[in-house]
Amino acid sequence: MSIIIKDLHANVDGTPILKGLNLEIPKGQVHAIMGPNGSGKSTLSKVISGHEDYEVTGGSIIMDGEDVLDMDVDERSRAGIFLAFQYPMEIPGVSNANFIRAARQARLPDGEELDAVAYYKELYEKMDALGIDRQFTARAVNEGFSGGEKKRNEVLQMMMLDPNYCILDETDSGLDIDALKVVSNGVNMLRSEERGFLVITHYQRLLNYIKPDVVHVLYDGQIIKTGGPELALELEERGYDHIIKPLATA
Amino acid sequence: MEIEDITAQSSIDQDTQDAIAIDRAKGDFRFPENHKYDAGYGLNADTIDYISKVKKEKDWIREFRHRALGVFESKPMPTNWATDDLNNIDFDAIRYYLSDGERPKRSWDDVPENVKITFERLGIPEQERAFLAGVEAQFDSEAAYSNVKEALEEEGVIFVNSTEGLREHEEIFRPWFGKVIPTGDNKFSALNSAVFSGGSFIYIPKGVKVKQPLQAYFRINSENFGQFERTLIIADEGSEVMYMEGCTAPQFETSTLHSAVVELVAMKGAKIQYVTVQNWSSNVFNLVTKRGMAHEDAEIRWIDCNIGSRLTMKYPGVVMKGEGARGEVISIALANDGQHQDTGAKMIHAADNTTSNVVSKSISVGEGISTYRGQVHIPKHLKGCKNNTECDALLINSNSRTDTYPAITVRGNQHVTQHEASVSQVSEEMLFYMQQRGLSEAAAMSLAVNGFVNDLVREFPMEYSVELKRLIDLEMEGSVG
């Protein structure tokens, strides 16, 4: 059981960004993707989740035997793909509780109604685990939230939707160290043999808290190097150049 | 559609029926017509004599009607500022008066069976049990059912239809009848004054605070039949009342005209809230004049939601006549394909230290057009007046349209006014975010629209706000994909 990405090519506004990307994320593992700005990290997360501005021009994404590229954004979500956004959107007037409830309801068969009592019980348990105040349920989704609150909300939604594969897009951006710990703890609670993670980050810092099994380096739309957790430390110490430059001159 | 079919279907697959049998479907059926009185097609002096005779009206009312007919005929269509669609109303193809010829009913048991079935499908009996102190429900032009609970009667509350109000309680209603909205206010207030029937006349005595909302349901059941109800609510000193009206209409093949006049009078320190959910079918011209007069320290709030009709023109107003009076208009409009919601507010400050507030939100879907027209008038000789106006428009599709015409006339420098307006769209990134959580595009759109109006929907009584959310969901279904 895994997401298998083969020879993926994708354009944004006609410009090729992903240029033959190969990647396999099995359930039960945490894969980190690191890379300099403009290497295609965020594009990869949008392409996997199905944003229509990102045009796939070649290759395939297969999740547990199913062709992901055939599915609409919401189908992919219900099939088990969750994207924790780098910049979560604000939804004025829609409370967090109603938003997550609507997302849960969307996963039920037609005509079946979500059990509201059980839903709130579960929501409160998970909020408690993330140290989220009860008043949070009535606030509009991400409206007026601090950076830390927004990312915590992403993790809460992840917990409530119980996805098979989680993509974290620069989840550490804009977080102070305390918020980073809370968010990382939340993600670590979700780690299991039943779930795969793709953690996209610019900095090694996040990987001190969410320990990856495999680290990939993305550069110019391709995975140029794959290794263990030590690769992240190496990048932190010596920068991307010492990996990229030998390739460029080769 | 035959009622038997509905029953048969529901016995076959109850779950499916329950799932789809919400709101819109409820209004989409009719019964065979059986009217004892019918004024025929078209409008002239004979039509008015006929109506007056059937209603056994006094001479002054008949003369009032005749004068109004003259005003109606002399006034041009206001197409110099309003839409040319008004010219498509064929006044000769309308029947101006229909009645089942029966006196309003006092108890539910007395109501004819087919009327009851209609009301059941509209959800009235449950609401009666759960919420209502009294129901004045208009079935065609006469109230087929009216019931004022004993407790209210004991407190001296009068809740009757217009005919009964003018006949039985002339001394209370005549002094204010046609005073807040003069016959000649506009062409359609004149039309209503000529042919009015039905509607509610309500008097709340001094100091009486009616705890439960009074409610009326309106319904049109005859093709080509215009409904011209007339409502007058007088809240005496220190009293409080909330009145709710909601309407659904069956679908007709030809256009139908609805032209009501609603006058509110809040005496010193009184409070009136008037709540409307308008969901006429999309061939109805809904041309309504609503205005309240607030005396010293009185408060009048119009809470108004327009979802249905082909064209709605409605600008609820408050004349703040006494010092310290407050006026408020909260309005939501949703214009879908083929619809034009031309709504707004009029705030006339006529005393010192008066306060008005207008919050308007409109949603245009597909080729729907929503228009906001606001008038705020504060003359030079007054001091300490305040107005706040906010109007926000949400456009769903690229061919949707919204227009805003705010007219704020403030003379003198001892006043505070502020005006905010915005036009926005549901952004693709917001939709992507919601869809990434598993919501279909239509569900995401519905949620965003419900969020947009959420702070205003909260102002509606509970059962209305639930219904509003469902109506918005239904309206949004066809807007995407």
Image (spheres, rainbow, N blue to C red):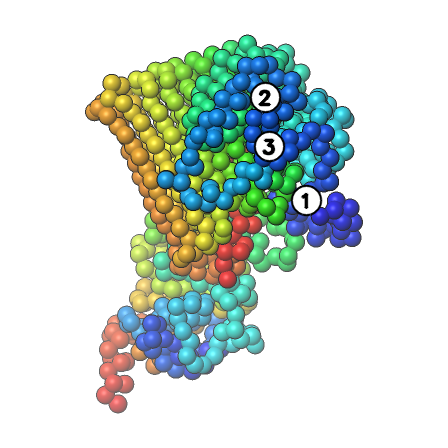
Give the residue type at disc 3. Tyr
Q: Is residue B264 left or right of residue A249?
A: right
Disc 1 from disc 2: Cα separation: 27 Å
Label 2 SS: helix
- Read off the residue under disc 3: B96
Residue holding disc 1? B29
Q: In the picture shown, does residue B141 fall above or below A95? A: above
Q: Where is residue A30 in the image (x, y as percent from the top left)?
A: 45, 69
**Towards the viewer: A60 or B191:** B191
Q: Which of B318 and A227 is in front in this view?
A: B318
- Foreground: disc 2 or disc 3: 3
The answer to whether B198 is drawn above or below residue B471 in the figure is above
> Which residue lies at the image location 49% right of the left edge and 65% below the top edge?
A73
Q: Mark 1 belongs to which amino acid? A: Phe
Q: How far is disc 3 from disc 1 in space, using C-alphas? A: 22 Å
Contact check, label 3 and label 1, Cβ < 8 Å: no
Element carrying mark 3: loop
Residue A42: % across, % down:
36, 68
Q: Which of marks 1 and 2 is in front?
A: 2
Q: Residue extending furthest bottom? A: A250
Circle 2 residue = B162
